[in-house]
Amino acid sequence: MHSKLIQLLLLCTFSLFSDVVFGDPPYTICSSSGSYVNGSSFENNLNNLLSSLSSNASDSKFYNTSYGIAPDTVYGLYMCLDYISNDSCQKCIATVTEEIVKLCPQAEEAIVWEELCQLRYSNNNFLGSLNVTGNIGLDNVQNLTDSEKFESAVNETLRNLTKVASFKVSANMYATGDVPFEDETIFALVQCTRDLTANDCNRCLQSAIGDIPSCCYASIGGRVLSRSCYLRYEFYAFYNGATGPTDSSNGNRESKNRSSKIWMIAGITVVVGLAIVFFIFGLYLVRNKRHPNGKNEIENHNINLGSLRVATNNFSDMNKLGQGGFGPVYKGKLSDGQEVAIKRLSTWSEQGSEEFINEVLLIMKLQHKNLVKLLGFCVDGEEKILVYEFLPNGSLDVVLFNQKQRAQLDWSKRLNIINGIARGILYLHEDSRLKVIHRDLKASNVLLDYDMNAKISDFGMARIFSGNEGEANTATIVGTYGYMAPEYAMEGLYSIKSDVFGFGVLLLEIITGKRNAGFYHSKNSPSLLSYAWSLWNEGKGIELSDPLLCDSCPGDEFLRYMQIGLLCVQEDAYDRPTMSSVVMMLKNESATLGHPEKPPFSVGRFNANDPDSQECSLNFLTMSDILPQ
Ligand SMILES: *[C@@H]1O[C@H](CO)[C@@H](O)[C@H](O)[C@H]1NC(C)=O
Ligand SMILES: *[C@@H]1O[C@H](CO)[C@@H](O)[C@H](O)[C@H]1NC(C)=O
Ligand SMILES: *[C@@H]1O[C@H](CO)[C@@H](O)[C@H](O)[C@H]1NC(C)=O
Ligand SMILES: *[C@@H]1O[C@H](CO)[C@@H](O)[C@H](O)[C@H]1NC(C)=O
Ligand SMILES: *[C@@H]1O[C@H](CO)[C@@H](O)[C@H](O)[C@H]1NC(C)=O
Ligand SMILES: *[C@@H]1O[C@H](CO)[C@@H](O)[C@H](O)[C@H]1NC(C)=O
Ligand SMILES: *[C@@H]1O[C@H](CO)[C@@H](O)[C@H](O)[C@H]1NC(C)=O
Ligand SMILES: *[C@@H]1O[C@H](CO)[C@@H](O)[C@H](O)[C@H]1NC(C)=O
């Protein structure tokens, strides 16, 4: 009876918000002025244009071209946001080129905006000319109280960036920046299509800024999608903390100073919403009291769906931090001001709610400074959600495999990260009350806190997805190419030594700044591991040191770490050290290290010609496993 009532109340809570939530991309403008016929040469030219744009997207964030002879010429261009990777740009454009003909069938002129890119074609030559009609404004649904002051701060920030993007030649029509505002930081981005002149870029962005009051007044975030430019601002570093050409700070500095002071909750809607949320919470308490086996911990860690929806703008794309193997992750801000990462598990976990809660409560007991803290969870109908602490510096892979960002990781920071990861795994393997094998250690599963300390994420997922140790062993499990131990990749056998292997790969990646998956030196050294091993044996290990480390890295220390890494990735699991010896070797400079035996020649399917190797893990279930100790 109570749960019916709760559902009803939850529905009421959401309906208060749902009508202000914007639809998801793609957004389109399809011209209705003319249409082409099927099988015409215009259609043929258009298809050729689209595939040419798509093929150029793998190595350029902007491209314009035309196809065919008059009068059937088609002109087109695409633009990816400058901060995304070549890979993401390629994917985005591949998607949009397919979408555009479906969304605007037979249109002679069309534009489609996706989250990270935009594509435009026309039968008229629009390249190099500006048209600012039809801008689309999108607001973040949360409003501010002191909106006037905020608006002028946003206005000024965007104007400053516009000048940089337009007139500073090296900026190449793109700029990002962050500006402190009260307890928060405004992060902003502007970008123009590069067919424009500097003056037109300036005009395009000024016009887009002028659209903000009508789309996004008082909103804590907003975007304006224009034909030849794009702008966005938020209270968080949506551009991944990546620094634009002009941006001297790293975008995370101010986050540190955020206090939990709540000042942005405004409007009667939210107050009413919260009142209802509290009321429901009260009902839960009453209900749990009446169940003799009701778990007290639930009251402490169970977070209701309503507040998670409020915290994430109803799981809006603007709050999305990424898409992991278990479902999307959102950034959220709870009503007490705390920032959290919210993992919305895909619904194919077959577990019942009771079991799920039991598993989560167990995993919640794993607490270590090098593990991402699991703060709470939510079970509501089909929804199963985990709430983690939010780490502003994102994941290690983003920092490590980006030339610009990697430079901030000097040798001592890298050692600190390696040691943190080692201690986190040691805790999982030996120190926690449960013996946990992670099974999917990789750079993207290591998050970084304010001070660049490593925190391991996604541990204990096997438990959550199977709910039963026996089953965990038989579930279909696929790790990530490039990190999988050979015995696991080939025979499906795993042990704590498979995690040691994953750690060794990570260590080598961190000190060399190179990805194992996708690394290819020669036929005899097809992977980073085999190449490192052969260099080490020839006494030339130092050749692999990251050139970005310059002189912050003492050569002998580099070689010692390399040796420890190589000991961890030895082909025979039996030869690999345990995590406790690894931690000791890392700590004790005078420890005598053994001679590493050969690493596996090549593991799994990763190789130089497999650009998808990083992506694979997202499509498979990757999980960690817990055994009773
Ligand atoms: C053109 O082809 C599309 C699908 O290929 C179809 O939906 C549409 O009706 C066709 N239009 C005409 C005018 O034949
Ligand atoms: C980019 O497009 C042009 C045609 O406009 C084509 O000649 C060129 O090969 C493309 N580049 C790539 C890398 O595909
Ligand atoms: C993207 O491609 C361009 C051109 O091939 C290249 O110069 C650039 O380094 C690539 N960027 C990344 C991050 O790989
Ligand atoms: C892109 O547009 C510019 C400006 O109109 C033009 O000069 C240039 O030739 C175009 N590039 C291609 C490859 O068509
Ligand atoms: C801009 O585009 C709109 C819609 O396509 C069109 O009606 C208008 O004439 C264009 N304006 C200019 C100045 O080209
Ligand atoms: C935010 O402010 C805008 C404009 O003042 C208003 O239309 C909108 O309803 C407000 N949204 C909320 C959630 O209060
Ligand atoms: C904008 O630029 C002006 C002049 O360079 C500077 O004084 C001001 O602080 C900047 N404002 C913001 C919000 O960045
Ligand atoms: C932004 O500031 C400029 C100059 O101070 C002003 O002219 C303009 O009206 C402001 N725009 C908005 C949207 O507030």
Image: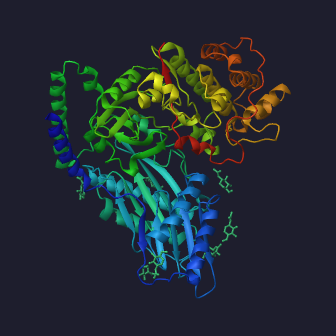
453 over 610 or under it: above or below: above
Residue drawn 58% across and 70% down? 50
Would you place residue 38 above or below residue 526 in this image? below
Image quadrant of residue 412? top right
Residue 466 image point, x, y percent: 43, 29
The quarter holding residue 5 reads top left
Q: Residue at 38% of width from left, 21% of height from top?
A: 362
Q: From the image, which quarter does the N terminus lie in?
A: top left
Q: Which residue sits at x=42%, y=38%?
A: 255
Say how many tags the image has: 0
Q: Please indicate, yes or no, whether residue 258 appears anywhere in the rendered image.
A: no
Q: Is residue 393 visible in the rendered structure shown here?
A: yes
User: Picture coordinates of residue 365 (x, y %)?
Assistant: 39, 19
| Foreground of the two, 353 or 252 | 353
Which is more toward the observer, 353 or 312? 353
Residue 167 x/y as whole percent: 56, 64
Q: Quadrant of ligand 4?
A: bottom right
Write the residue at 47% across / 44% down.
Answer: 323
Q: Is residue 282 above or below residue 198?
A: above
Farthest bottom residue in view: 71
Residue 431 on image: x %, y % = 50, 13
Looking at the image, what colour scheme do you see?
rainbow
Name, please, the residue furthest toward the right.
538
